[in-house]
Structure formats: structure tokens, C-alpha cells
Amino acid sequence: MSNTTTMSPPSTSKLELRTAYGPVFRDVLNTPPRDCTAEEIPIIDLTPLSSPNFEDRKELSKQIRAAAVNTGFFYIKNHGIDDKTIADAKKQLLA
């Protein structure tokens, strides 16, 4: 005896994005959004930015591009911005 389960694809809507090159259309799932997991948000280490080795900087640029294209955003670490500067900016934001 065999059990066959057929799953229908999720329903989608057509989304129009207006760009400098004209409209672009994307299929978007009609399911409710979900929270992302920590594994889905890229964390990029900016240490290679100051490397004298061009290949290190090139690899970093590939990571940034991949995160921007595939995810749309990313976290950065080892950016060199002083903790006090970050705290002051946060204070101004929340004021």
C-alpha cells in the first residue's frame, strides 16, 4: 500500500518594484512573515579592510556584496568605531 501526498505550491502575489531602469516584477509568497534566525543574518568582520593584501580586501568585498544581494542587510564587527561614539549616537537616536 502506498501513501502519496501531493502538496500544492504556496500562493503568491506579483509585486512591482519601480527602479531607475523601469518596473521590475517579483513573485512574493502570501504567507505571513516570520522572524529570522541568527544563522540567517550574516556577520561580516571588517578587519581585512585595513589589510595590505589586496586579495583579503577583495574577499571582504565579495562577502559584503553577497550579504547585500542575498539578505539585504548584515551585521558588522571589528569596524573600529569607539563604543562611546556608538553610545552617543544611540542616545541621540532615542532622544
Image (cartoon, rainbow, N blue to C red):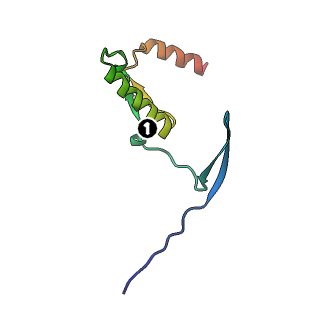
Residue sitting at x 56%, y 49%: 33
Q: Quadrant of the N terminus?
A: bottom left
| Residue closest to the eye, 23 or 41 | 23
Residue sitting at x 45%, y 12%: 84
Identified by mark 1, the residue type is Ile
| Residue closest to the eye, 36 or 43 | 43
Q: Quadrant of residue 2?
A: bottom left
The answer to whether one can see residue 14 in this image is yes
Residue 70 location (% of width, % of height) = 48, 40
Q: Residue lying furthest bottom in this view?
A: 1
Q: Quadrant of residue 19?
A: top right
Q: From the viewer's perspective, is residue 45 above or below residue 41?
A: above
Q: Which residue is mark 1?
A: 41
Residue 3 location (% of width, % of height) = 41, 81
Residue sitting at x 45%, y 35%: 67
Q: Local crowd at mark 1 within 10 Å, few (<14), some, or many (≥20)?
A: some
What SS does tag 1 mark? loop
Q: How many marks?
A: 1
Q: Residue lying furthest left in this view?
A: 53
Q: Quadrant of the C terminus?
A: top right
Left of 12 or right of it: where is 80? left
Residue 89 location (% of width, % of height) = 53, 16
Residue 60 location (% of width, % of height) = 37, 26
The answer to whether one can see residue 71 in this image is no
Q: Residue lying furthest front in this view?
A: 21
Q: From the viewer's perspective, is residue 82 above or below residue 5?
A: above
